[in-house]
């Protein structure tokens, strides 16, 4: 069943009149600066709009409606209190450039957030400005480069990245003018130390690691890795995407990392919002402190104020116009206050319990784990390689069939190293009952794969749409609605991707 | 098993090479490569007259799941690119050794031709990869 | 234990299934030396009730009666329906729409958004948004460098009239890619790009020219001439525009003889509250010839197995999760929730509503300028035409005047001297449709009082 587009619901001249101000007179700006044709915006009543967007929301899966075990995304419950408190008028209506004298409430929250994150990670200082994990990585690698340049070592331009790393890692390295050197992973999930030793040298800027890794296991040789890289003059970057697994158990600084980012929208339960906003706050040890992106909050006798380039002359600069995603930071702050000190380490306890329980139960149901001899961190990888070989049913087919069973699929085909894989992260906010129902559904699908693979290959059957033609989407690019009267323009736009 | 015409030469990066009548060399990607990529949605070709060294990334073949670099097997100058691929990238899938050719290059260094793989070499490579 | 549902019984059963004695055993692969940590600096948990009281007190400290600040973030009326709908759990707690069949709601919203932004900016294609206007401009610069094959210099002209926070951001993000940003001065009498200075670059290899409209001073540039200059000199034009103003002003796709190929800006004015600076969203649109260089996500419409229309993420091969080190950008998110709100907002305003908002903003700014300059000594620094922001020169120390006005509950504007030393005692003030006649009268009264000797000035 498809829905009309909002434009198709409208009629010329229809409008939501209660939302229209009354200008005093006609426009007196010079003619040559003015628009001659109105933009294509919907002409609908308020009820049309409310009904349309309410109905569209009902075509989504979400944490609030479905178990959503996406590996590496940490789809935990987003507390409603965090939303309400971040949207209090004093915070919501405050202009980013408002004088510091009327910003002390917000700045107190942000300052405390900086302090608490320092305590949780062992880092010396935090900048809350990066607006997503990828921006946090950008800041981190830029700081590493700045550090080497500051010490007269411009030749250090190589960033080492495990072959199992998330795509943002190598993409970030390139954006920072570095080259990427890939490190192989052993079959037990740990990095190959011999190769690492051979690859480090005077051109090494640093290494980017996630620990636990993207393979869902703890990198046991982290001590040796740290020594090898530091001895060669490189620095260590910690991708905090999997922090939920070790929160309150291990300090990244103690593992030897010099800089890190945290995805607040993962570990600190801020909403995913259908693809954002996130927040990728960045923390540093003493060596990189001079280069922190501005602004960040400092406290002096008068109260709280913003640190700028005068306070931080070697800063890499600013990553956005203002001070980051304040609304997301406030939600993370609220979450932290609700969970508290002892609650923080319990998060990783139950994240690990749920992941290991699910892994065991699925293994007992006949599924093949990628690293059966290892503990799961907060997530684990299973492979459908043999199922695919004997029945033709792939990880993609399983994912689509799970939607029909009322579960959002786990992450598929990542990490790239494991063929036909599912990366499953239940998070600590799911109950044993939910996990058991998931195991039941997966077991049923496995049985159906063996008995009637056709059914799975045609899934999903009970969603608003069936499988979509990706190839057509890319070849015949249709990325905007064109009203029927503009048929000629429409032809042009829908031509093969050019 | 994918198709590997015996009269062509190959590279370890899954390109094929064929000599044209005028001494230039036509380059494309192999049947194995196009199968691995899936349906192509776009091909980015080098500029005509671009000067390349052997091993330079000079084109991109893009499907919904991957965008792979194509490396020039030879040093030389680009003489012509396959304009048909702008509207029909799927030619690379349907006829990788014929109408799905990517570009033609005038080779600068004849010695490099010796280093290309024969069809038997390439077949052996594919068998090794499969293990 | 907040948000953790396990009972003791649940836990025991689960431990038994796994075959371990205690939860702590699950961490036995972590070297013991790493496990000693002290979280003393973090306070104990508090209840939602306690936290609510606490946060309410803090938020109340930051309340101001009237805000006349702009400079990249603007106060507009947001209809109640916008956030009631956007914070529905199905939008708020959904992930990126990678499983298209389970995300048709979000995907359709984004498709509608892409349509609206492309049309508003007069371009062919819009992406699904970037983090904010400043980083969107940085991405636009990177895009221009990739797309402008004729130019080898990677030199970008950044007008001094571009918001300095944006210029800083561009410099930070493009720093390591061999891109050099040259400053283009403004004409001190008009506040607009100094065309003589621009002409000096005519014979050079310039990759891109950034054209803000309006610029940071609120001044409206001669965009047709600037677009044509770029076209005539093989320079890629990048427009930085205010989305509300586009309801009135000529969009970048129509500037000059054939428009500029890339447009970007801050989307916050479209239904996003000021929120202390974020989250906002950046929009980026372009001509269809540049679509493969467009960073970020893109939603396309296609057909499903039954031939029914549906939506899906497309051209993903450009993105980090596939292309990795050769990606167009490292960007992974779009600002999904903000885009949802903006789309609902634009639907509720419609073309006529948006036009009226823009026109009212313009007239409120005119009223503000008139009221402020009727005070002896207060001058308008730049002439018309302008859009919703004006620069006022004060006959006294701007910092102190603003501090006094803040004490009476008014954020009166931004002092410009820290970025423009030649604009001593100048203040950037903004009035949107949210300011009434009374508000403006109050502003003028407060300004007059703050300037008077009795108010402690001079």
Image (spheres, grey):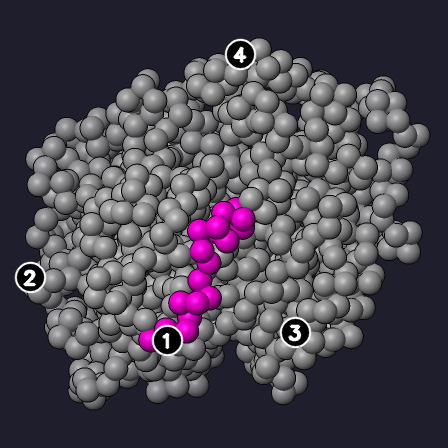
Reading the chain from its start, which is encountered first: label 4 or label 3?
Answer: 3
Residue for badge 4: A452
Residue B56 in the figure: left or right of residue C36: left
Question: The numbered mark 2 sits on a residue in which chain?
Answer: A
**Dot 3: element:** strand
Bounds of the magenta segment: B108-126
Q: Residue at x 88, y 38 (%)?
A: C24
**Dot 1: element:** loop
Disc 4 or disc 1, which is closer to the eye?
A: 1
Residue for badge 2: A31
Do the residues at discs 1 and 2 belong to one chain?
no
The disc at residue A204 is 3
Q: Residue C202: horizontal and vertical position, in percent?
A: 18, 84
Disc 3 or disc 1, which is closer to the eye?
A: 1
Residue C150 in the figure: left or right of residue A333: left
Residue for badge 1: B109
């Amino acid at each position: 069943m498809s829905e009309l587009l909002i434009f198709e619901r409208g009629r010329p001249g229809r409008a939501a009149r209660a939302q229209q101000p009354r200008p005093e007179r006609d426009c007196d700006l010079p003619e040559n600066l003015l628009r001659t044709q109105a933009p294509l915006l919907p002409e609908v009543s308020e009820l049309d709009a409310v009904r349309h967007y309410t109905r569209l929301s009902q075509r989504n899966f979400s944490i609030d409606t479905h178990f959503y075990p996406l590996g590496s995304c940490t789809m935990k419950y987003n507390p409603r209190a965090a939303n309400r408190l971040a949207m209090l008028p004093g915070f919501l209506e405050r202009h980013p450039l408002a004088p510091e004298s009327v910003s002390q409430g917000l700045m107190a929250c942000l300052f405390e957030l900086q302090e608490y994150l320092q305590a949780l990670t062992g880092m010396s200082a935090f900048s809350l400005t990066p607006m997503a994990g990828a921006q946090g990585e950008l800041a981190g690698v830029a700081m590493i480069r700045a550090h080497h340049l500051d010490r007269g070592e411009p030749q250090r331009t190589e960033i080492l990245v495990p072959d199992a790393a998330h795509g943002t890692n190598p993409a970030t390295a390139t954006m920072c003018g570095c080259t990427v050197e890939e490190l192989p992973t052993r079959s037990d999930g740990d990095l190959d130390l011999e190769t690492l030793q051979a690859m480090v040298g005077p051109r090494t800027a640093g290494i980017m690691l996630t620990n636990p890794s993207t393979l869902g296991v703890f990198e046991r040789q982290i001590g040796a890795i740290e020594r090898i890289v530091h001895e060669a003059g490189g620095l260590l970057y910690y991708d905090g995407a999997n922090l939920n697994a070790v929160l309150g158990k291990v300090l990244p600084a103690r593992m030897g990392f010099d800089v890190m980012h945290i995805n607040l929208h993962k570990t600190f339960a801020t909403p995913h919002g259908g693809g954002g906003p996130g927040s990728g706050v960045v923390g540093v040890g003493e060596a990189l402190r001079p280069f922190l992106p501005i602004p960040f909050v400092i406290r002096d006798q008068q109260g709280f104020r913003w640190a700028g380039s005068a306070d931080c002359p070697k800063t890499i600069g600013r990553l956005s116009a203002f001070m980051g995603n304040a609304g997301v930071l406030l939600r993370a702050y609220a979450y932290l206050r609700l969970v508290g000190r002892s609650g923080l380490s319990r998060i990783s306890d139950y994240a690990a319990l749920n992941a290991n329980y699910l892994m065991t139960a699925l293994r007992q149901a006949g599924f093949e784990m990628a690293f059966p001899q290892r503990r799961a961190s907060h997530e684990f990888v299973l492979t459908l390689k043999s199922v695919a070989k004997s029945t033709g049913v792939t990880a993609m087919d399983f994912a689509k069939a799970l939607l029909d069973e009322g579960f959002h699929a786990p992450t598929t085909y990542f990490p790239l190293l494991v063929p036909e894989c599912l990366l499953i992260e239940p998070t600590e906010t799911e109950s044993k009952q939910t996990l058991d129902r998931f195991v039941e559904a997966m077991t049923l699908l496995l049985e159906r794969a063996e008995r009637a693979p056709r059914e799975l290959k045609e899934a999903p059957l009970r969603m608003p749409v069936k499988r979509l033609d990706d190839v057509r989407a890319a070849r015949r690019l249709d990325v905007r609605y064109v009203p029927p009267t503009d048929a000629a323009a429409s032809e042009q736009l829908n031509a093969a991707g050019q | 098993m994918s198709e590997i015409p015996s009269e062509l030469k190959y590279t370890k990066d899954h390109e094929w090479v064929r000599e044209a009548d005028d001494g230039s060399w036509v380059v494309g990607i192999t049947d194995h490569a196009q199968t691995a990529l899936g349906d192509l949605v776009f091909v980015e070709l080098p500029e005509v007259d671009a000067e390349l060294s052997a091993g330079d990334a000079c084109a991109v073949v893009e499907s919904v799941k991957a965008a792979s670099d194509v490396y020039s097997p030879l040093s030389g100058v680009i003489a012509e690119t396959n304009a048909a691929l702008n509207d029909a990238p799927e030619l690379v899938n349907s006829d990788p050794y014929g109408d799905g050719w990517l570009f033609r290059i005038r080779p600068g260094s004849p010695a490099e031709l010796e280093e290309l793989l024969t069809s038997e070499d390439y077949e052996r490579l594919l068998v090794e990869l499969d293990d | 234990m907040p948000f953790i549902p396990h009972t003791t019984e649940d836990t025991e059963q689960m431990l038994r299934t796994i075959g371990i004695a205690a939860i702590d055993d699950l961490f036995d692969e972590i070297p013991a030396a790493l496990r000693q940590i002290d979280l003393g600096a973090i306070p104990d948990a508090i209840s939602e009730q306690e936290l609510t009281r606490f946060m309410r007190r803090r938020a109340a400290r930051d309340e101001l009666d009237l805000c006349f600040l702009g400079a990249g973030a603007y106060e507009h009326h947001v209809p109640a329906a916008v956030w009631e709908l956007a914070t529905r759990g199905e939008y708020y707690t959904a992930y990126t729409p990678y499983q298209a069949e389970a995300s048709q709601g979000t995907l359709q919203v984004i498709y509608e958004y892409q349509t609206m932004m492309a049309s508003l900016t007069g371009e062919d294609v819009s992406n699904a948004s970037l983090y904010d206007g400043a980083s969107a401009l940085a991405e636009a610069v990177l895009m221009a460098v990739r797309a402008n094959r004729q130019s080898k210099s990677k030199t970008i002209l950044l007008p001094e009239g571009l918001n300095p926070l944006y210029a800083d951001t561009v410099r930070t993000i493009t720093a390591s890619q061999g891109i050099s940003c040259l400053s283009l001065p403004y004409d001190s009498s008009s506040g607009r790009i100094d065309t003589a200075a621009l002409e000096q670059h005519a014979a050079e290899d310039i990759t891109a020219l950034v054209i803000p409209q309006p610029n940071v001073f609120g001044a409206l540039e001669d965009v047709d001439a600037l677009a044509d200059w770029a076209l005539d000199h093989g320079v890629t034009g990048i427009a930085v525009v205010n989305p509300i103003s586009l309801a009135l002003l000529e969009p970048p796709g129509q500037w000059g003889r054939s428009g500029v190929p890339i447009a970007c800006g801050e989307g916050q004015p479209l239904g996003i509250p000021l929120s202390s600076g974020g989250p906002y969203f950046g929009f980026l649109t372009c001509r269809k010839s540049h679509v493969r260089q467009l960073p970020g996500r893109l939603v396309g419409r296609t057909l499903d197995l039954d031939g029914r229309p549906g939506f899906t993420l497309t051209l993903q091969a450009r993105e980090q999760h596939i292309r990795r080190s050769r990606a167009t950008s490292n960007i992974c998110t779009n600002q999904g929730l903000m885009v949802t709100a903006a789309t609902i907002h634009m639907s509720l305003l419609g073309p006529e509503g948006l036009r009226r908002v823009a026109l009212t903003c313009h007239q409120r700014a005119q009223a503000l300028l008139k009221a402020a300059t009727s005070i002896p000594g207060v001058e308008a620094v730049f002439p018309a035409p302008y859009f919703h922001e004006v620069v006022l020169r004060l006959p006294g120390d701007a910092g102190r005047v603003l501090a006094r006005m803040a004490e009476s509950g008014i954020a009166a504007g931004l002092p410009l001297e820290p970025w423009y030393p030649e604009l001593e005692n100048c203040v950037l003030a903004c009035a949107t449709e949210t300011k009434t006649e009374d508000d403006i009268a109050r502003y003028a009264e407060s300004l007059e009082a703050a300037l008077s000797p009795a108010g402690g000035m001079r």
